Amino acid sequence: MIQVQNLTKKYNETKALDSVNFEVREGEVLGFLGPNGAGKSTAMKIITGFIAPTQGTVKVGDLDVVDNSFEIREKIGYLPETNPLYTDMKVHEYLKFVAQARQIPKQNRQDAIKRMIKVCGLDSVIHKTIDELSKGYRQRVGLAQAMVHDPDILIMDEPTSGLDPNQIVEIRDLIKKIGEKKTVILSTHILPEVTATCSRVIIINNGKIVAQGTSDELTSARAGQEIIYAKIRGDKERVSSVLSEYNQVKTVKTFSGGETGVHGFGIEISEGDGRELVYRCAVSNNWTLLEMYRKQENLEDVFRRLTTTEE
């Protein structure tokens, strides 16, 4: 349904996106996952026609996002990170305004609004002004405005940002319900968001896609391998260098150890019990081994490994 090819966006000399390629299939709920500043919002804005790419193409079906911007906007509902609400309007007034702006035929507007009130659970607040609403209900109104014209595709940028735990659960359930009938792209930096709502994940970092697949694919791709997490008091470069010399050590990544002179290490082991290797290495090099454990990678570990900058 959506094809993104060699997508690049530059702001002066800074590349917010760098030759990004992916596709979104019809009926899919795609999680666009990355740390703050990774390029998620930029990609969303280009797909929705809000900004133009520097290079590359985005197509929705056979339509190009640059050449056919208005036609594509008719097919897309967009909820940006900053919810586009007129807070002095009542909920029903605002939805009527959006329906008119979306050029829904007059005879169909009331039915469209009623449908969104039901889908988004707005019955109890329909006559309230938007500035009276909680953040959770404002997000519901934002979803209603994004879908009032019944688009094929719904794109949401950080839809649960700033919500309390109960509101987050409510919005997630609503997104899953919407995803049963529409193609959804969900941009977030919150891992539980992805595992709770998305059928497939793209991880982006520094403007580049570093992994994509289902949660199971991203974690099982490294099945049979393990990561040893260790905190060691010693020279960081020396520890990394020595550990990297062993054949069964595939990679060594460093993290903050939380104390002066202490460094955290993520040591990827291809075979055998890596704990024994790390222990013997620490003893023979007179390092102080403060903490060590092993685990198979979950999505959080994959995300951390792919997006954390080394010390």
Image: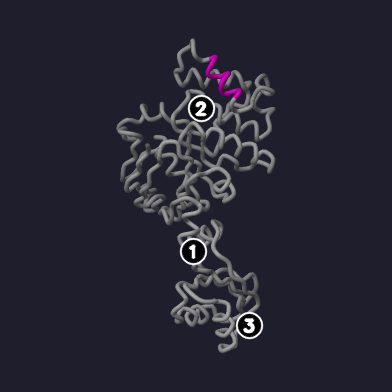
Q: Main secondary structure of the magenta part?
A: helix
Taking the image as shown, residue 290 lies to the left or right of residue 26, namely right
Nearest-to-viewer mark from 1 and 2: 1
Of pointers 1 and 2, the one earlier in the residue sequence: 2
Q: Residues within 10 Å of mark 1 (few under 14, many from 20)?
A: few
Which residue does the numbered mark 1 point to in the structure image? 223
Taking the image as shown, residue 256 lies to the left or right of residue 186, namely right
Which residue does the numbered mark 3 point to in the structure image? 288
Give me the C-alpha separation between circle 1 and circle 2: 40 Å
**Identity of the residue drawn at 65% across and 21% down:** 126
Of pointers 2 and 3, the one earlier in the residue sequence: 2
- Identify the element where label 3 is drawn: strand
Q: Quadrant of residue 174?
A: top right
Which residue does the numbered mark 2 point to in the structure image? 147
Instruction: Estimate the x, y position of residue 162 in percent, counting from the top left.
Output: 63, 42
- Identify the element where label 2 is drawn: helix
Magenta-tinted stretch: 110-118
Question: Looking at numbered disc 2 in the image, what kind of residue is underneath it?
Answer: Met
